[in-house]
């Protein structure tokens, strides 16, 4: 910034214009040469002045844009934090209902095993819900998950459970293909699609069903993470409890489609109106398009009060970032403006842009503005994480600081990696997306 003769701060662009005007004023007072030299100099300076006007307007336009984005994101931040206090971890009503609860068919697509799979699946056998069935889906009979599922079925013979092997090809989405036979055999009017890494509380299903009111067709859980040890677990919990939770709750409050299908309860009749499960076999982001199709038919969707507890046995920084990159590629293909607007939802890019804008528009010092922004954002995220966790997280504030800084610093690079390499890797398969989200499987390259 530059200080002019009356001690006020102006932007560089404004200072340049003032300098041009002063030089123009000085030229008028000089008496060197004839009048035509004065006229020529005046025209040259006027030409420079008119060239600078569009640049000044552009600079101030960007500054106004960044300030509006900064204000809007802070409003979303405050709104999501307030909404979380009201929405999450509400007491589940265990009193007898006036009408019996509807039965639920639970689809569990499985591929392989991990150290936590047995304990995760066991929580589905011990839920406190009157009527449900477990439908396990495995692609091949030699999958190690088959033996694990059979052992659980023998341990809990009182729970209705069946195992489906082989799947049915209805598209390129392997999850849909894996679940299709079980979906066709499901006997209850509510269908819960639950990923293999989800761990359930005893009252989770009851909470979800209680949110399934008359005009609601989808009740989904907000993604979160189960308590675990190690930096990767801290990183996962910090990400899903701050950045993800903020946008998820904000979108739900505003009525924006934020459906993530890792734990989602759906009315079967509403899904059949949209063409059934097979209708979404050509989309990798089947959860988003499923919600879009159902809502377009007049149904509504709700977020359950209990978050989804992800408890994958493969907890590593690389595995989480690979998943975040895959999700980013899906968002970019479905909503291309994501590539332009998503960086502004992150603390550091938004703070840098707002600090520059505050300097241009308000004469504020950018560095103190940026540091205050980061500090308040950090404290707000700590409060958000406590709200999602329903108490103190299972790590220290120092560990939270390290996980938060790592998460915020990595976020722009995760998005950049998703933009530079649009190919999506999902387990052993690779895909490429068309604009709009339709997927095509890439054939594996032969090795010689």
Image (spheres, rainbow, N blue to C red):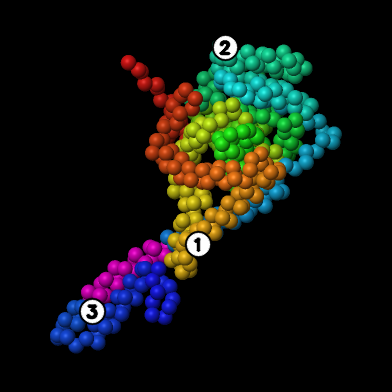
Q: Give the magenta part as a residue range.
A: 43-61
Q: Does 226 sit above or below residue 398?
A: above
On the image, the x and y values in percent for residue 112 come to 56, 19
Q: Classify the position of the N terminus by image quarter.
A: bottom left
- The residue located at (36%, 68%) in the rendering is 13
- Mark 3: secondary structure: helix
**Label 1 with label 2: CB-CB less than 8 Å:** no
On the image, the x and y values in percent for residue 263 come to 64, 32
N-terminal label among 1 and 3: 3
Q: Tag 2: Cα neighbours inside 10 Å, few (<14), some, or many (≥20)?
A: few
- The residue located at (54%, 57%) in the rendering is 373
- Mark 1: secondary structure: helix
Task: Tell me the number on the disc at residue 368.
Answer: 1
- The residue located at (48%, 39%) in the rendering is 328
State left or right for residue 190 relative to residue 326.
right
Q: Residue furthest top?
A: 142
Task: Tell me the number on the disc at residue 141.
Answer: 2
Front in this rendered view, residue 97 or 357: 357
- The residue located at (72%, 39%) in the rendering is 211
Q: Which residue is mark 3?
A: 42
The reply to whether residue 438 is visible in this rendering is yes
């Amino acid at each position: 910034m530059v200080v002019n003769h009356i001690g006020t701060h102006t932007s560089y662009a404004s200072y340049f214009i003032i300098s041009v005007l002063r030089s123009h004023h000085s030229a008028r007072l000089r008496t060197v040469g004839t009048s035509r030299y004065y006229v020529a100099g005046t025209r040259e300076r006027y030409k420079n002045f008119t060239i600078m006007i569009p640049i000044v307007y552009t600079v101030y336009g960007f500054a106004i844009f960044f300030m509006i984005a900064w204000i809007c994101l802070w409003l979303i931040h405050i709104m999501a934090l307030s909404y979380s206090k009201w929405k999450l971890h509400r007491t589940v009503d265990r009193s007898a209902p006036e009408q019996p609860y509807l039965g639920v068919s639970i689809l569990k697509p499985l591929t392989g095993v991990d150290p936590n799979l047995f304990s995760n699946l066991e929580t589905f056998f011990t839920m406190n819900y009157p009527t449900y069935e477990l439908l396990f889906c495995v692609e091949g009979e030699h999958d190690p998950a088959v033996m694990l599922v059979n052992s659980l079925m023998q341990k809990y013979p009182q729970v209705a459970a069946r195992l489906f092997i082989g799947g049915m090809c209805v598209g390129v989405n392997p999850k849909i293909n894996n679940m299709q036979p079980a979906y066709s055999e499901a006997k209850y009017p509510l269908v819960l699609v639950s990923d293999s890494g989800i761990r359930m509380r005893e009252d989770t299903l009851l909470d979800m069903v209680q949110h399934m009111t008359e005009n609601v067709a989808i009740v989904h859980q907000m993604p979160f993470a189960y308590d675990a040890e190690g930096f990767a677990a801290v990183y996962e919990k910090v990400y899903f409890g701050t950045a993800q939770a903020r946008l998820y709750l904000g979108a739900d409050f505003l009525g924006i489609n934020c459906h993530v299908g890792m734990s989602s309860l759906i009315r079967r009749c509403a899904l059949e109106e949209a063409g059934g499960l097979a209708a979404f076999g050509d989309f990798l982001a089947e959860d988003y398009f499923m919600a879009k199709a159902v809502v377009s038919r007049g149904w509504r969707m709700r977020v359950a009060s209990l978050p989804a507890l992800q408890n994958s046995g493969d907890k590593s920084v690389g595995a989480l970032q690979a998943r975040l990159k895959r999700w980013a590629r899906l968002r970019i293909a479905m909503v291309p403006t994501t590539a332009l607007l998503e960086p502004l939802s992150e603390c550091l890019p938004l703070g840098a842009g707002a600090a520059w804008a505050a300097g241009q528009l308000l004469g504020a010092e950018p560095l103190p503005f940026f540091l205050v922004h980061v500090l308040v954002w950090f404290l707000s995220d700590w409060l958000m994480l406590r709200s999602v966790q329903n108490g103190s997280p299972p790590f220290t504030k120092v560990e939270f600081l390290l996980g938060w800084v790592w998460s915020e610093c990595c976020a722009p690079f995760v998005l950049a990696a998703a933009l530079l390499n649009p190919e999506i890797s999902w387990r052993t398969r690779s895909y490429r997306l068309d604009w709009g989200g339709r997927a095509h499987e890439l054939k594996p390259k032969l090795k010689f």
